Image (cartoon, helix red, strand yellow):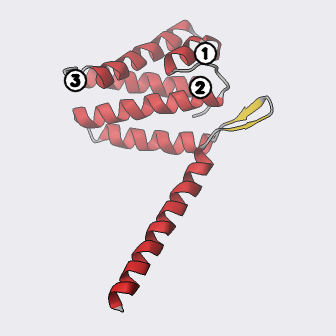
């Protein structure tokens, strides 16, 4: 009898955790209604705070994780702004008008290339200066898009 209660309790807890995860993710999604797109800016701000905390821990693994997450977050923002494209790169090409200066746009490309090096080159040696630049450029991009 005790084992049955424990199994039932575990099943209930797992179902509860899964339901919370689904509800939490529902609030993070981009909502499309007709022609307009609504983005969850609170999610962007909370996620950016997490990225900065991880980056602040220092070290190559934290730098890499922060850059990967920052890239995903900027892509989320591009999608939320209704920028068309099948990949981040395509969306970024179509997002030039979102940036007030070419250097900010070009800097985001730099950050995305750092991310690609991390993702596709197992031997990429990420130094702290390069990581710091990339994170700064991602932040600037989010500020330029007025989501942060």
User: Which element carries disc 3, helix, strand or loop?
Assistant: loop
Whichever of labels 2 and 3 marks the residue nearer the N terminus, that label is: 2
Picture mark count: 3
Seen from the viewer's position, the closer of residues 146 and 14 is: 14
The disc label shown at residue 58, or none: none
User: Which element carries disc 1, helix, strand or loop?
Assistant: loop
Identify the residue at horizontal 47%, vertical 31% (top origin).
72
How far apart are labels 2 and 3 at the CA level?
27 Å
Q: Is 52 placed left or right of 105 in the picture?
A: left
**Which is more foreground, mark 2 or mark 3?**
3
Identify the residue at horizontal 19%, vertical 21% (top origin).
123
Whole-percent x, y for residue 109 in the image:
45, 14
Q: Is 117 placed left or right of 16 in the picture?
A: left
**Which is more foreground, mark 1 or mark 3?**
3
User: Which element carries disc 2, helix, strand or loop?
Assistant: helix
Residue farthest toward the right in the current orientation of the protein? 34
Which image quarter holds the C terminus?
Answer: top right
Whole-percent x, y for residue 45 in the image:
54, 41
Q: Which residue is mark 3?
A: 122
Give the answer, above or below, for where 25 lies relative to 36. below
Whichever of labels 2 and 1 marks the residue nearer the N terminus, that label is: 2
The quadrant holding residue 54 is top left
Give the answer, above or below, for where 120 lies relative to 11. above
Seen from the viewer's position, the closer of residues 91 and 134 is: 91
Q: Which residue is mark 2?
A: 78
The quadrant holding residue 66 is top left
The disc label shown at residue 95, or none: 1
Q: Are marks 2 and 1 in contact (CB under 8 Å)?
A: yes
Identify the residue at horizontal 28%, vertical 37% (top origin).
62
Query: How many residues crowd mark 1 within 10 Å: few (<14), some (14–19), many (20+)?
Result: some
């Amino acid at each position: 009898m005790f084992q049955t209660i424990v199994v039932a309790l575990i099943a209930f807890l797992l179902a509860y955790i899964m339901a919370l995860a689904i509800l939490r993710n529902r609030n993070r999604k981009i909502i499309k209604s007709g022609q307009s797109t609504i983005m969850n800016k609170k999610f962007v701000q909370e996620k950016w705070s997490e990225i900065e905390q991880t980056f602040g821990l220092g070290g190559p693994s934290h730098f890499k994780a922060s850059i990967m997450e920052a890239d995903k977050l900027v892509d989320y923002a591009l999608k939320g702004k209704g920028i068309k494209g099948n990949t981040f790169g395509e969306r970024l090409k179509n997002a030039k008008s979102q940036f007030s200066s070419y250097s900010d746009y070009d800097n985001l490309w730099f950050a995305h290339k750092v991310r690609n090096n991390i993702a596709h080159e197992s031997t990429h040696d990420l130094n702290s200066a390069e990581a710091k630049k990339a994170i700064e450029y991602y932040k600037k991009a989010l500020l330029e898009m007025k989501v942060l």
